[in-house]
Image (cartoon, grey):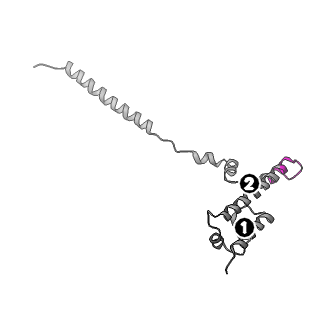
Amino acid sequence: MAYNTEELYQMALKIIKEREVRTIEGVVALMPCDKTTFYKHFPIDSNELNTIKRELNKKKVEGKERLIRMMGSITHGSPAERIFLYKLWADKEEKEAIYDTSIKAKIETPRHEITLNLIKDDEQNLIQEKKESEEKNGNNNTKTY
């Protein structure tokens, strides 16, 4: 089936305006075309796709603002319900802050290079001291026959 790009574009904007969608996938799910067709009409760097993304972001911000107002109101919803709703609206950075995954992702395994180098240095010092001691003792313990 052939789709008109302008009609698909207007349909996507209407869906964003009228429905509670927050992602491109949500928009595509409500359109008569599949994801492949959608991206054929709206390539990644196209102005139309950028406008659709911008409208989705505006919708997210509006939703977050409503949620923040609701969270400020003690009478509206339980704390668990408000946290759940915030998690639904959260972007990647906010989810990392909520779940504290950014800290866990940055932990590196400890490196023991310094310890190994110290052990090597100690071994070399002991060998050197032993040589010096043998040379010193060897010179003093010379026997003449």
Residue 13 is drawn in which quadrant?
bottom right
Q: 144 or 46: nearer the eye? A: 46
- Residue 27 circle label: 1
Residue 107 spot, x, y in % from top left = 57, 45
Residue 35 badge: none
- Above or below — where is 105 with respect to 16? above
First in sequence: mark 1 vs mark 2: 1
Pinpoint residue 130: horizontal percent, then vertical percent: 29, 27
Horizontal side of 81 relative to 109 (left or right) equals right
What is the quadrant of residue 16 in the picture?
bottom right
Mark 1 and mark 2: Cα distance apart in space: 20 Å
Q: Quadrant of the N terminus?
A: bottom right
Q: Secondary structure at mark 2?
A: helix
Which amino acid type is marked by label 1? Val
In this figure, which residue is indicated by the disc labeled 2? 87
Does 22 appear above or below 121? below
Q: Which residues are magenta?
A: 69-81
The front one of 7 and 78 is 7
Q: Residue furthest left?
A: 145
Q: Disc 2 marks which amino acid?
A: Lys
x, y percent for residue 110: 51, 42
In the depicted structure, whether residue 9 falls above or below residue 142: below
Residue 25 forms part of the magenta stretch: no
Closer mark to the observer between disc 1 and disc 2 = 1
The foreground one among 17 and 114 is: 17
Q: Where in the figure is residue 5, as x and y percent of width and height?
A: 68, 73
Quarter the C terminus occupies: top left
